[in-house]
Amino acid sequence: MFSHRSVATAALLLLSTNVTLADSSGESLRAPKAFDSVRNRTERSVALFTEAGKVLQHPRCLNCHPVERQPTQGDDLHPHMPPVHGGPENRGTKELPCTSCHGPHNTATLGTGLKSIPGSDPWALAPASMAWQGFSLGEICAQLKDPARNGNRTLAQIEEHLAKDHLVGWAWHPGEGRTPAPGTQQIFGELIAAWIKTGAHCPKP
Amino acid sequence: MPTQINVNGAMHSVDVDDDTPLLWVLRDVVGLTGTKFGCGVALCGACTVHIDGVPRRSCITTVGSIGNASIRTIETLDANPIGKALQKAWLDLEVVQCGYCQSGQLMSAAALLAGNPKPSDADIDTVMSGNICRCGTYGRIRSAIKQAANQLGSSQESA
């Protein structure tokens, strides 16, 4: 039979587990409804994008949007080890492609210190025109809207890409040992949709 | 249910879980121990094999992900001119020190020359950066790759 003390201990453990689970995705991501109180449409649009920026500027996204053609790693954006290059098609060089290590799924490792190797199909670096590291949120916003830099996408295609793309979605399922992007891809997609619906206004660069 | 894998041109039936690393299967089930375990986290390159010609780290490649692809290991490096030229260059220049990482180094070098017959120093450094050698044989590895490339180029010109 459980004593009161063991029940209390179990409750504390459960509570701490819940706290851990709640914190495991880092900061929260507010849904578009949270911005209904911003009455000015332009200001609401900027606020929606700023919220979505918690994802866009998260390390899980920034690491593969480098300015140099070499990805970074970790929450501190340290240089990728080994020092690989994006190559002509953003999937590594022909002789050392990303797929040498990154398979179609996250893979558990046999070693210590690194619990999993991230993977998705395809696994690729963002094109040079879509570099985000070191950019302000306003600059990223302007880039996202610019067909010359966004892969010639319309805003509707940007929404589709961010809300449904498999590799974008990896940011919320990055494998053991990595902090996922905040919220969910669904909420992120809703924020982008609401941002576009309110005029796709950008924060100041 | 056993999985069928094609290793060095021969089919093998391996009765392992789908998430078993290919490296374990090659060494412990198929009995090909030339491929080495280094770090287990795809950072050192000692476990490099070719899967459909692409260099892959077998320590983090699950056997269930292989499908019908062809796996090539160090045991058949000399089955083509590139491998033969690399073997000769490695011996000529006495590249090896302790030797533990060398099967991975050679498999990466073979993939390099298959994709880039005349690599520059920078090309070699870029591609071989994924293979670590604790004895520091990098200089000799680079020279040997260049010698193999030159030999292959000369044989093509004289053919």
Image (cartoon, coloured by chain):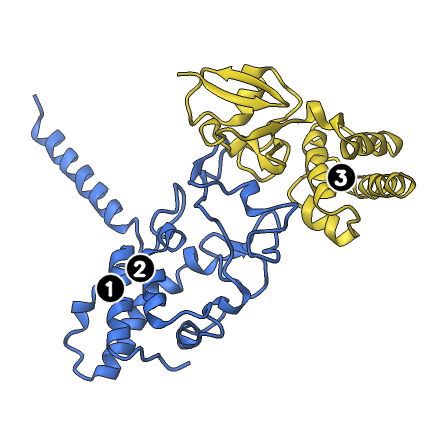
Which shade of the palette goes to chain A? blue
* Nearer to us in this view, B50 or A137: B50
The amino acid sitting under disc 3 is Gly
Pick the front one: B138 or A99: A99
Residue sitting at 75 percent across and 30 percent down?
Answer: B80
Quadrant assignment for the N terminus of chain A: top left
Q: CA distance from mark 3 to mark 2?
A: 47 Å
Residue type highlighted by circle 2: Ala
Q: Give the residue type at disc 1.
A: Glu
Chain painted in yellow in the figure: B
- One can see residue A183 in this view: no
Q: CA distance from mark 2 to mark 1?
A: 8 Å
> Most extreme residue toward the right, as rendered?
B158
Q: Position of residue B18 (x, y in %)?
A: 42, 25
Picture coordinates of residue A77, whole percent (x, y): 50, 57
Mark 2 vs 1: CB contact within 8 A:
yes
Q: Is residue A187 left or right of residue B139?
A: left
Marks 2 and 1 belong to one chain: yes
Chain name for mark 1? A
Q: Quadrant of residue B112?
A: top right
Residue pointed to by mark 3: B136
Q: Chain of mark 2?
A: A
